[in-house]
């Protein structure tokens, strides 16, 4: 059974930064894509960022900065089966529960979620 342990959420002022971490354990198979979704109150869960085992990344448009420089950066340490989400220039609309996920050949596994609250 794959387990995902998230950490790094919390309360931050607008313009601040947070770094989320998610460590996967217990997988007998190679982990393919990993990433983060978020769900704000009253809204649907949306994909924030994803990264393949080869390091290819993708981001939702709302976290991309000007000139294609993302305010969020996803990275991954395959030796530790850990994915990170560095979030900068946070806005109140980034407030949500952030869920980590990991894809293996038999399906997708989810973390319990970590709360990120950005105050104005």
Image (cartoon, rainbow, N blue to C red):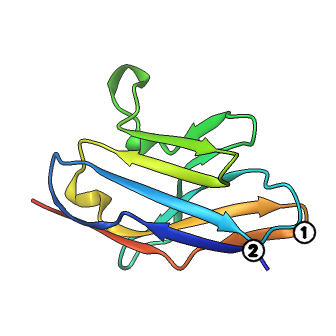
- Residue 102 at what x, y percent from top left? 70, 62
Who is closer to the viewer here, 43 or 22? Answer: 22
Left or right: 101 in relation to 105: left
Q: Number of callouts in the render?
A: 2
Residue 95's quadrant in the figure? Answer: bottom left
Q: Residue at x 75, y 42 (%)?
A: 53
Q: Residue at x 67, y 34 (%)?
A: 55
| Distance between mark 1 and mark 2 Cα atoms | 11 Å
Q: Quadrant of the N terminus?
A: bottom right
Q: Residue at x 70, y 68 (%)?
A: 25
- Residue 117 at what x, y percent from top left? 24, 68
Eyeballing the image, is 53 above or below 56? below
Question: Circles 1 and 2: CB distance less than 8 Å?
Answer: no
Q: Residue at x 85, y 55 (%)?
A: 30
Looking at the rendered structure, which numbered label has been put on residue 22?
A: none
- Residue 120 at what x, y percent from top left? 9, 59
Who is closer to the viewer here, 104 or 1? Answer: 1
**Label 2, on which residue?**
2
Label 1 residue SS: loop
**Label 1, on which residue?**
106
Q: Residues within 10 Å of mark 1 (few under 14, many from 20)?
A: few
- Residue 18 at what x, y percent from top left? 30, 53
């Amino acid at each position: 059974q794959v387990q995902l342990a998230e950490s790094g959420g919390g309360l931050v002022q607008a313009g601040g930064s947070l770094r989320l971490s998610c460590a996967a354990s217990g997988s007998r198979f190679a982990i393919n894509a990993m990433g983060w979704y978020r769900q704000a109150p009253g809204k649907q869960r949306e994909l924030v960022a994803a990264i393949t085992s080869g390091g290819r990344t993708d981001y939702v448009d709302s976290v991309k900065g000007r000139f294609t420089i993302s305010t969020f950066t996803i990275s991954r340490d395959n030796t530790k089966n850990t994915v990170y989400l560095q979030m900068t220039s946070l806005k109140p609309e980034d407030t949500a529960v952030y869920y980590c996920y990991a894809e293996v050949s038999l399906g997708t596994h989810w973390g319990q979620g970590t709360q990120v609250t950005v105050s104005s």
